[in-house]
Amino acid sequence: MECTINWMGQSGMAFIAETGSGHVLAMDGAPEGGGHNHAPRPMETVLAGTGGCTAYDVVLILKRGRHDVRGCQVKLTAERAETDPKVFTKIHMHFVVSGRGLNLQAVERAVALSHEKYCSASIMLGKTAQMSTSVELVEA
């Protein structure tokens, strides 16, 4: 896996990341840190990537189990250390999974499997952060 980060110039703290798969992601800093707030902060992208990683797992696990999953939303809330390095110290992920006739235990199992076995990002962040999850089902 590869990624190249380019600083967009001396007038701020914006960066463009080009991934090994050929996609582009913009990042920027907060105004108090010299940025212009034109894109997500780098640590927000870490949190977003973690949410995407675990949502991917949950949907894939449910589909493979032949569950009629039709939607999956993950709302992440995080706390960071007050001093440098400002690592994540707590992350809560609330899953809202929609579908027809979904079984709460099956969805909770998919979430647990993601966090215990498959999601590299959440397992990695779990080394510094207390991780917690909750699940809500919506009939669709």
Image (cartoon, rainbow, N blue to C red):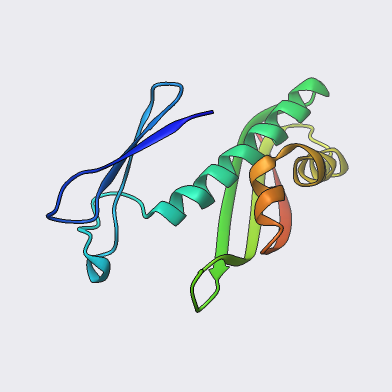
The image shows residue 70 at horizontal and vertical percentages of 64, 29
Name the foreground residue: 41 vs 62: 41
Residue at the location (72% across, 60% down)? Answer: 132
Front in this rendered view, residue 128 or 41: 128
Query: Which quadrant, please, contains the C terminus?
Result: top right
Judged left or right of residue 103, residue 94 is left
Q: As drawn, is 122 to the left or to the right of 117? A: left
Q: Is residue 126 above or below residue 99?
A: below
Query: Which residue sits furthest left?
Result: 11
Taking 32 as reference, is 64 above or below it? above
* Vertical side of 19 occupied by 73: above or below: below
Q: Residue at x 56, y 65 (%)?
A: 87
Rendered image quadrant of residue 64:
top right
Above or below — where is 117 with respect to 78?
Answer: above
Asked which quadrant contains residue 35, the reply is: bottom left
In the rendered image, residue 134, in percent from the top left (x then y), is placed at 73, 56
